[in-house]
Image (tube, rainbow, N blue to C red):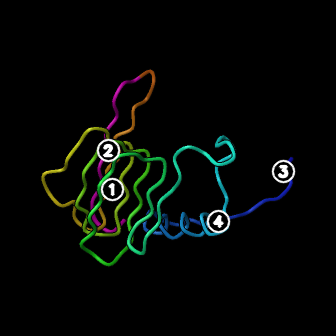
Amino acid sequence: MTRSTTFEHVGSVAELPEASRSLLARRIAPFYEPEGGEIRAFEASDRVVHGSVGVEVAVTGTAPVLVEGCASTSLRLGGDNLVVGLEGRALPFELPRGFVLDERRLPRAGWWSSSRGGTA
């Protein structure tokens, strides 16, 4: 049971940055984050950065980006991107508009990397 419920529709990856922005505006945090969690989300007109530390983000396009779970990473993004789980990386190129880059560490499988291009 929950005391209150909020539904945020996400129909495509391209809608994730605005959905994240909406949740931040309502001050909704994950259930596992203690009150006043250590790593607070950062929001600007062109980006939402969650659960990340030591991340430099430059966005060249107009569409917002979502960066989550990254550390010690430098990114140049074309806009309309989703980047998850990068650690200790400096991309030597601009990630084109609409691309997704996911490099989360899975406990049993080690590193898992995925990328997808086109319209997010």
Q: CA distance from mark 2 to mark 3?
A: 34 Å
Q: Earlier in the sequence, mark 1 or mark 4?
A: 4
Label 2 or label 3, whichever comes before in sequence order: 3
Q: Does dot 4 land on a helix, a strand or a loop?
A: loop
Residue 46, percent from left and from top? 38, 72
Q: Which residues are magenta?
A: 109-120
Q: Give the CA separation, mark 4 to mark 3.
A: 16 Å
The numbered mark, 3 or 1, whose residue comes first in the sequence reads 3
Q: Earlier in the sequence, mark 2 or mark 1?
A: 1
Badge 3 amino acid: Thr
Kindly state the secondary structure of the residue where label 1 is placed: strand
**The C terminus is located in which quarter?**
bottom left
Q: Which mark is residue 8?
A: 4
Indicate which disc residue 55 carries: none
Tell me the crowding category of disc 4: few under 14, some 14 to 19, or many 20 or more residues within 10 angstroms, Cα based.
Answer: few
Q: Are marks 1 and 4 in contact (CB under 8 Å)?
A: no
Q: Nearer the viewer, mark 3 or mark 1?
A: 3
- How far apart, in angstroms, are the residues tagged by discs 2 and 1? 8 Å
Q: Is residue 83 above or below residue 12?
A: above
Q: Label 2: how many residues lie within 10 Å, few (<14), some (14-19) or many (20+)?
A: few
CA–CA distance in space, label 4 to label 2: 25 Å
* Label 3 to label 1: alpha-carbon separation: 33 Å
The residue pinned by badge 3 equals 2
Please name the residue that numbered disc 1 is placed on: 100
**Left or right, residue 49 beside residue 5:** left
Q: Which residue is mark 2?
A: 114
Q: Could you tell me the amino acid type at mark 2?
A: Ser
Q: Nearer the viewer, mark 4 or mark 2?
A: 4
Amino acid under disc 1: Val
Mark 2 and mark 1 in contact? Answer it, CB < 8 Å. Answer: yes
Q: CA distance from mark 1 to mark 4?
A: 21 Å
CB-based contact (under 8 Å), mark 3 and mark 1: no
